[in-house]
Amino acid sequence: MLSNPAFRPLQTALILIAALLVVALLATLTPPAMQRTIVEAMIKLVVVVGLFVFVGNSGVFSFGHVAFMAIGGYMSAILTLTPARKETLLDLPGFLEALQLPWPVALLVVLVTVGLLALLIGWPLCRLRGIALPMATFAVLIITYVIASNLKEVTGGRQALVGLPRYTGLWVAFGGASLAILAAALYGMTRHSLLLRCSRENEVAAAATGIDLERERLIAFVLSAMIVAAGGVLFSHFIGTITANTFYLDLTFVTLTMLVAGGMRSLTGAFVGVALVSIVSELFRGIERGFTVGDTTIAAPPGLQEIALAVILLAILVRRPAGLLGDFEIGLPRRRASCKAETLTQQG
C-alpha cells in the first residue's frame, strides 16, 4: 500500500519519524545540556512543520504564525498553573483562577480554541492577494505582542510569567514532533492540499478551473495555526517561564529561516532546515561563550549567531532559491516495474 504514489507523503512522514527516533535515542547518551538543545530543536520542528502546512502548500509567506505560539503558551499557562500562583501573578476571574487542568486536557482545549480563533482571523485574511496577506499576518503578530505586553491581568504584562509545570522532556518533544509530521503528511494526502498546491503554481489558472482559493487557504491556515500553537505549548512548558518577547521577532526570524533554508515546499526540507539551523546556532553559541587558552578567554562578540544565520540563509537563497531540497521528498525507492507502467500510462 505504501508503494502507491498517493501514499508518498505518509512514506516521507514515517522515514522522518524514524530518523527523529534515532536522534532521540542518541540524545539519551548525551549530557543534559545537549539534551536540552535537542529538545528545543524538536519543539521548533513542530513550529516549522506547522508553518510548512500553510506556507509550503500555499506559497504565501506568513510572518504572524508565532502569534499562535504565544496564544497557545499563555493559554496553557493559565490552564495549568496552580490557583495560588495565579492569585499571586495574575488577576483572573474566579473560575479561571480556581481552574487547574492536567496538561493533556489543557493542550486539547488550546488546540480547539486556537483552531476557532484562526478560523475567525483567517477568514478575512485569506481573501487578500499579493503582498497584502503576508503584511496582514505580520500585523497579527504585532497586535498579539502588544496585547500580551500590556494585558497584565491575564499575561503578566512585560514581566515573566513563571512557575509553569515543566513537563516537556525529550520523549514528550519527540511525540509532539512526530504527531506534527504525521498531521502534515495526512493533510498532504487530501484533495485540499492538492488544490492548494495547484493555486500556488498559478492563482489565475486555479481560479479559472473552479478552485475556491479562499477556502483552501483557510483550511491550511487553521491546521497550521493549531500545530504552531501546540509548539507554543511545548515550548512554554519546556522553559517554564514566558514573556511577550519570547514569541516575537527573534523566534519569527529563526523559524522562517529554518523553513526557507531547507526548502519551504518540502516536509523533508523543513526537517533538514531545522537540523541545519540548530547545529549552526549551537556551534556559534559555543563560539560566543568562548574558550580558554591558558589564562585568556577567547570569545566572539554577541550577535555572531544571528549574523551567521543571516549569511547562511543569503548564501542558500543565492545558490538555491528554492532552498536546499527544493520540493524533494524522501521516500521508499520506487520499483522499476511500477515506474515503467506509469511511464507507459502517461505516454498512452
Image: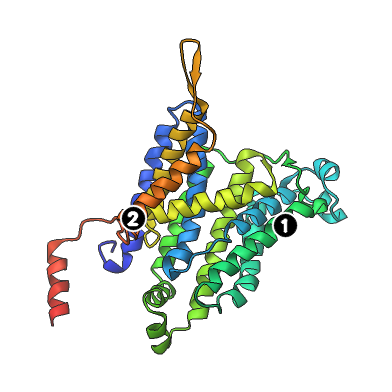
Identified at 43% across, 57% down, the residue is: 182
Q: Is residue 44 above or below residue 116?
A: above
Q: If the image is split into quadrants, where does the N terminus sit?
A: bottom left
Q: Which mark is residue 58?
A: none
Task: Identify residue for label 2.
Answer: 318
Q: Judging from the image, what secondary structure is the residue with disc 1 in?
A: helix
Q: How many marks?
A: 2
Q: Relative to 175, is 8 on the left or the right?
A: left
Q: Judging from the image, what secondary structure is the residue with disc 2 in?
A: helix
Q: CA distance from mark 2 to mark 1?
A: 35 Å
* Residue 112 appears in the rendering: no
Residue 295 placement (x, y as % from top left) = 50, 10
Q: Between tags 2 and 1, which lies in front?
A: 2
Identified at 49% across, 37% down, the residue is: 304
Identified at 70% across, 41% down, the residue is: 164
Task: Identify residue for label 1.
Answer: 146
Amino acid type assigned to the residue bearing label 1 in the image? Val
Q: If the image is split into quadrants, where does the C terminus sit?
A: bottom left
Q: Residues within 10 Å of mark 1 (few under 14, many from 20)?
A: few
